[in-house]
Image (cartoon, helix red, strand yellow):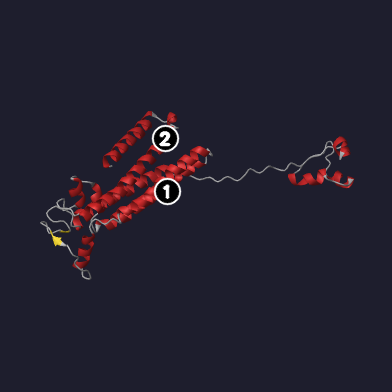
């Protein structure tokens, strides 16, 4: 070993040759690994590690997310006013809160069918967007930042899944039964009656039963939970975006900040 280190020069062609070069027991084996002066040494190219490239289309998903919500709101509203027994005088949400809320377009049958389908698509797009945000944060490999983003985004995803219960808290079970009865195969439940506008409802003279009030509170709780979750998520997204705002144009900054302020104000009103 001393003779090799003193008189000979070695060239490592690959990591696999190291045991053979430094643990050799014969001169013949040593000679095969000797590079003589003036010899041309073949160079093995170093391979770069393979990289995975993922394109994240944030803006596309944001537009699809918004379109799904407003299209669902529009279709459900049309069906509510044209094919459901909705009237302000008998609507439970209007009677309970004393004001109009667009969410009532999601409550009456058969508009509820379109609302459930559309909002399901809306929530899936929101979950996909949140997942893309987490991937974007994860590639930075900053542990605390990844952990905090994972906690916020994970909570928002859980609340999105829970939000579906808004449609399981059925405010108007009699409407569905009445629809079935009108088309045969159904039965008339206890307490069903026709109001002043010939609408089928559990209400009589604008009164709400305790059972109605309990369902309305549960129905509203799922909605408020979702709004609060979206508010926290939007604040987190704004914080992430603010880190790169220095390179934005003044117009882009104004649109982003103005849009967020309007959105937060709307969320506060509806909670």
- Label at residue 239: 2
Residue 149 appears in the figure:
yes
- For this orientation, the residue located farthest to the left is 196
Of the image marks 1 and 2, the number of the one nearer the N terminus: 1
Does the rendering let one see residue 133? no
- Establish if 187 lies above or below 202: below
Tell me if residue 243 comes above or below residue 98 in the rendering. above
Image spot of residue 201 (x, y percent) = 17, 58
The residue pinned by badge 1 equals 128
View extreme (bottom): residue: 185
Mark toward the viewer: 1 or 2: 2
Compared across the picture, whether 149 is left or right of 180 comes to right
Q: Residue furthest front?
A: 210
User: Which quadrant of the rendered structure holds the N terminus?
Assistant: top right
- How much space separates mark 1 and mark 2, taking CA atoms? 20 Å
Report helix, strand or loop for mark 1. Answer: helix
């Amino acid at each position: 070993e001393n003779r090799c280190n003193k008189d000979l020069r070695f060239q490592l062609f690959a990591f696999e040759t190291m045991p053979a070069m430094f643990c050799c027991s014969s001169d013949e084996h040593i000679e095969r690994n000797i590079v003589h002066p003036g010899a041309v040494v073949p160079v093995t190219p170093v391979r770069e590690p393979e990289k995975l490239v993922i394109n994240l289309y944030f803006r596309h998903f944001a537009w699809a997310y918004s379109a799904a919500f407003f299209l669902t709101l529009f279709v459900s509203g049309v069906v509510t006013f044209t094919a459901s027994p909705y009237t302000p005088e008998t609507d439970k949400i209007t009677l309970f809160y004393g004001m109009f809320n667009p969410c009532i377009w999601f409550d009456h049958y058969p508009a509820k069918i379109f609302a459930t389908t559309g909002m399901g698509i809306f929530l899936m797009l929101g979950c996909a967007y949140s997942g893309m945000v987490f991937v974007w944060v994860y590639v930075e490999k900053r542990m605390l930042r990844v952990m905090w983003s994972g906690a916020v985004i994970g909570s928002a995803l859980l609340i999105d899944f829970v939000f579906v219960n808004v449609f399981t808290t059925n405010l108007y079970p009699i409407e569905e039964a009445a629809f079935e009865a009108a088309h045969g195969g159904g039965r008339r439940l206890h307490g069903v009656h026709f109001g002043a506008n010939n609408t089928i409802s559990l209400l009589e003279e604008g009164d709400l039963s305790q059972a109605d009030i309990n369902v309305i509170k549960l129905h509203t709780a799922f909605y408020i939970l979702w709004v609060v979750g979206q508010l926290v998520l939007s604040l987190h997204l704004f914080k992430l975006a603010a880190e790169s705002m220095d390179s934005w144009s003044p117009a882009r900054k104004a649109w982003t900040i103005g849009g967020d302020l309007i959105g937060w104000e709307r969320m506060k009103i509806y909670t």
